[in-house]
Amino acid sequence: MEEVLKEYNPWWYEPYSPNTIRRSKYLDRIMENIDNKSIIVITGLRRVGKTTIIRQTIAELLKRKVPAKNIFYVSVDNFELRAHTIREIIDGYREINKIPVGEKAYIFLDEIAYKEGFHQEIKNLYDMTNLKIIISSSSASILRDKRAFLTGRTKTFEIMPLDFDEFLQFRGVKVKKYDHVLLKRYFEEYLMLGGIPEYVLTQDVDYLKELVENIVYKDIVAYHNIKDKAVVFSLLSLLSERVGKRLTYNKLANILKISVDTVRRYLSYFEETYIIYMIGRYGSPNERIASPRKVYFGDTGIRNVLTGFRDTGGLFENVVFLRIKDKNPSYYIDESIELDFVFDNNIVECKYTDEKNKKQDELIEKLSEKYNIEILDIKVMLKRELGMSWNYD
């Protein structure tokens, strides 16, 4: 174990500065919480940049003159560590660097969900040691603590794919904010490529295909011991053709010749791995339960590799959803007239083109006395992506 741990922590022996692009929107917030007691939880889609942000956090700690031996990183899914508990791994680290019990150290445990029973182990470390604990996972299961071991002890950061401003930064592109024609051209490119950092840098389609296969076959099929893996992939492909559209479990089940319960279960697995998100209808509990749901992808590039680059209106709506998803939006419908998102006292309708809808305009007019309504066209979208706040009162 000793050699494995040393390989993970090169800063113990030499200067360390990761050659990566800084994602300030996450790194700054993590550093604001780095010295309080809370366990930092970093989660999000596979290959969205969680480990890179962890390494950037380590570099920031070193800049703050934290002794290198007091910073420990390990990916607990390492095959050579499979027989060791989290506590044994940390004890191994303490032994290597002669860290006494009670001395402050920063512990980064990557892909923590691979360790069975990690919730209780992390709780024990939190309660009984002077460690700052940072954990990460590509599965939302990290957030589902059935026995509430970590309740009230965590601060969670979901790392999202690159937003448009970050996309331009990763592409090395600088465009004046008033150059609307060029910005729109790059934004269309952004809708196509999405925001998986490595893919934006390389545009290697095989990389993105491999990512989708890993999520489907490793994180879902293998993890949940599903026998018919082709059905899982077929369901994901069906969803990719229905971004921003209402869909029912019954219809999906009929198409794939599987049960409704199976559809519901597979969709929950997709959500668990952040590859999709789903929203329901705004209304009474009965209306929400009985009505179709709408699906959005965690990354538009992933969606496009499944179905091809088309339906820019749906992709535009998908990106808007990703910016406001923390508001827990629903869709609004009145006598078959639909508006994209409603949350709190706000309604947002996405308009990638100038196409008019008379009945929709009439509904917006009727609702304008009760809700703050924003028609989010491409110009407004670009302003929000390049500096205007996404916060809604």
Image (cartoon, rainbow, N blue to C red):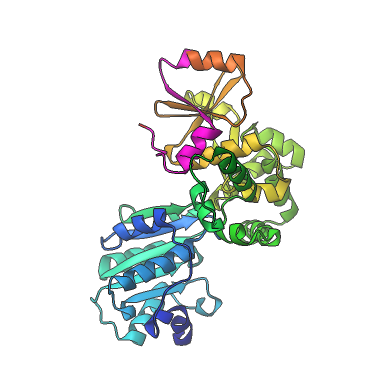
When asked about the image quadrant of residue 242, the answer is top right
| Vertical comparison of 71 with 324: above or below | below
Q: Is residue 105 left or right of residue 219?
A: left
| Place of residue 258 in the rendered image (x, y in percent of width and height, measured from the top left) | 73, 42
Give the residues in magenta.
366-392
The residue closer to the viewer here, 279 or 361, is: 361
| Place of residue 107 in the rendered image (x, y in percent of width and height, measured from the top left) | 36, 71
**Is residue 31 in the magenta section?**
no
Q: Which residue is drawn at 68% across and 59% down?
A: 213
| Place of residue 354 in the rendered image (x, y in percent of width and height, measured from the top left) | 61, 25
| Vertical comparison of 36 with 294: above or below | below
Q: Residue at x 51, y 52 (%)?
A: 174
Q: In this view, does 63 lie to the left or right of 116?
A: left
**Is residue 381 in the magenta section?**
yes
Q: Is residue 120 left or right of residue 239?
A: left
**Image quadrant where one finds the C terminus:** top left
